[in-house]
């Protein structure tokens, strides 16, 4: 069966595009045309459900899922943590409105070269190729099987962009420089190679791997060895940039606390409930103080957990008679102490959201920092890969 020409996809694609236009994420008519004319179903022949098994639906139901404004899980990899091995997401077709937003932020012009980091299914690669011409599109992915699949999908549409199975952190020096670099995987800092391979006046758009906050980075080249930009508050949750095809986690990342050490017991005057009430604005601000920070509230256990790969704090949700909360800390440092300081700073600075934050990145991982309001201001935090 020729699934490219399968009946009913055009109507669904047109409806999805109209939905994205109405939502304000497709202001450019040329991108709207790409979303209408590129068949997403060619790139998503199989969808995995919440139980990590293929969704069993008839053809019409499959098309309905494919042309919904939803993220579609397409691949998992078994990975272990302290609770055993699990099938963890390793590839997906991202939510169309997020893709549209990132393409809009890219502000790419005809004739410019784009490097995509994270080929995945190839659908986003196809949108870029439709808009710019495949000769201007380059894409890499760490997983050779994904690259092979994407190449086949793209060829069915007559598109032949340059694809390679490679570590996205290295960019693609052979074909540099690029006018734009678009990452469909989340990063904790800007890989130096991206900065080196970007033209003057070039732009990088990438999701920031900041836990539940998950904003976008929109970075412009401001010097031969530097990019700078404000954090875009648009929520864009992506799988991490990874350096191994058989590992769904990014370099140095874990699914939870992996450290050891003698517990430290104490109390805190900070109500742990305030951490979840602060939402993603607070989560991002605390992540700047403790990269890799994750926050989880377990009401059934009566505790709040905060952790990085190297440290863990457990805080009782119920206050004691003296109005304080019990804290148990383990690991390489006292994480809750950092959280207390970060929360106090956040409130003192009038609870800044991502719109007040920016990032300046030199072409080295130890020369990158986030800043509040002004790159030369009083408040900044170093960025570095988690681990």
Image (spheres, rainbow, N blue to C red):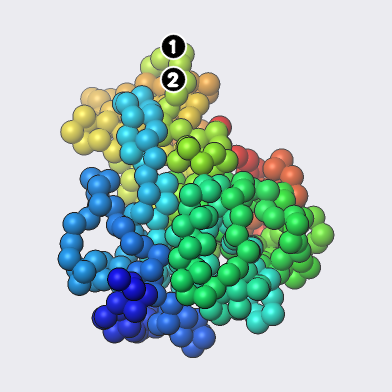
Label 2: how many Cα within 10 Å (few below 14, some 14–19, many 20+) = many
All told, the count of numbered labels is: 2
Relative horizontal placement of residue 111, taking residue 118 as reference (left or right): right
Residue at 32% x, 34% y is 86
Label 1: how many Cα within 10 Å (few below 14, some 14–19, many 20+) = few
Q: Measured from the top left, where is residue 346 in percent x and y?
A: 49, 48
Quadrant of the image containing the C terminus: top right
Q: Which mark is residue 225?
A: none
Q: Tell me if I can see residue 364 in this picture.
A: yes
Is 74 or 152 nearer to us in this picture?
Answer: 152
Relative horizontal placement of residue 107, taking residue 147 as reference (left or right): right
Q: State if disc 2 and disc 1 touch (CB < 8 Å).
A: yes
Q: Is residue 27 above or below residue 124?
A: below
Q: Measured from the top left, where is residue 158 in percent x and y?
A: 52, 75
Helix, strand or loop status at disc 2: strand
Residue wearing tag 2: 330
- Residue sitting at the far right: 224
Residue wearing tag 1: 262
Q: Quadrant of residue 257?
A: top left
Q: Earlier in the sequence, mark 1 or mark 2?
A: 1
Q: Is residue 152 above or below residue 169?
A: below
Q: Measured from the top left, where is residue 177 in percent x and y?
A: 76, 63
Is 78 or 21 nearer to us in this picture?
Answer: 78
In whole angstroms, how far apart are the C-alphas of marks 1 and 2?
A: 6 Å
Q: Is residue 95 above or below residue 120?
A: below
Residue at 38% x, 17% y is 265
Helix, strand or loop status at disc 1: loop
Is 64 or 235 nearer to us in this picture?
Answer: 64
- Residue sitting at the far bottom: 29
Q: Tell me if I can see residue 104 in this picture.
A: no
Quadrant of the image containing the N terminus: bottom left
């Amino acid at each position: 069966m020729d699934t490219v020409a399968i009946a009913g996809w055009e109507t669904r694609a047109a409806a999805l595009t109209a939905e994205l236009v109405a939502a304000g994420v497709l202001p450019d008519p040329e991108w709207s045309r790409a979303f209408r004319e590129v068949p997403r179903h060619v790139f998503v022949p199989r969808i995995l459900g919440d139980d990590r098994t293929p969704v069993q639906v008839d053809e019409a139901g499959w098309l309905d899922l494919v042309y919904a404004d939803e993220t579609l899980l397409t691949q998992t990899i078994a990975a272990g943590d302290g609770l055993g091995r699990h099938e963890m997401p390793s590839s997906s077709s991202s939510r169309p409105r997020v893709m549209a937003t990132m393409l809009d932020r890219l502000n790419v012009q005809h004739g410019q070269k784009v490097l995509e980091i994270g080929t995945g299914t190839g659908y986003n690669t196809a949108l870029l190729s439709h808009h710019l011409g495949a000769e201007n599109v380059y894409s890499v992915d760490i997983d050779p099987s994904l690259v092979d699949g994407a190449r086949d999908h793209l060829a069915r549409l007559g598109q032949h962009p340059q694809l390679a199975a490679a570590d996205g952190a290295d960019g693609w020096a052979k074909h540099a420089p690029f006018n734009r670099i678009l990452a469909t995987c989340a990063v904790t800092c800007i890989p130096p190679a991206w900065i080196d391979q970007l033209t003057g006046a070039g732009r990088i758009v990438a999701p920031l791997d900041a836990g539940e906050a998950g904003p976008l980075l929109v970075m412009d080249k401001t010097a031969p060895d530097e990019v700078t930009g404000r954090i875009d508050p648009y929520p864009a949750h992506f799988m991490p940039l990874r350096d191994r095809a058989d590992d769904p986690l990014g370099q140095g990342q874990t699914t939870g606390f992996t450290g050891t050490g003698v517990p430290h017991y104490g109390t805190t005057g900070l109500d742990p409930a305030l951490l979840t009430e602060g939402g993603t604005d607070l989560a991002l601000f605390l992540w700047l103080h403790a990269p890799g920070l994750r926050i989880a509230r377990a009401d059934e256990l009566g505790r709040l957990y905060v952790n990085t790969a190297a440290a863990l704090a457990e805080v009782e949700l119920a206050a004691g008679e003296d109005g304080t909360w019990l804290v148990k800390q383990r690991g390489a440092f006292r994480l809750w102490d950092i959280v207390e300081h970060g929360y106090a700073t956040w409130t003192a600075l009038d609870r800044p959201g991502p719109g007040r934050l920016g990032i300046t990145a030199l072409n080295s991982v130890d020369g990158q920092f986030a800043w509040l309001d002004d790159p030369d201001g009083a408040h900044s935090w170093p960025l570095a890969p988690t681990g």
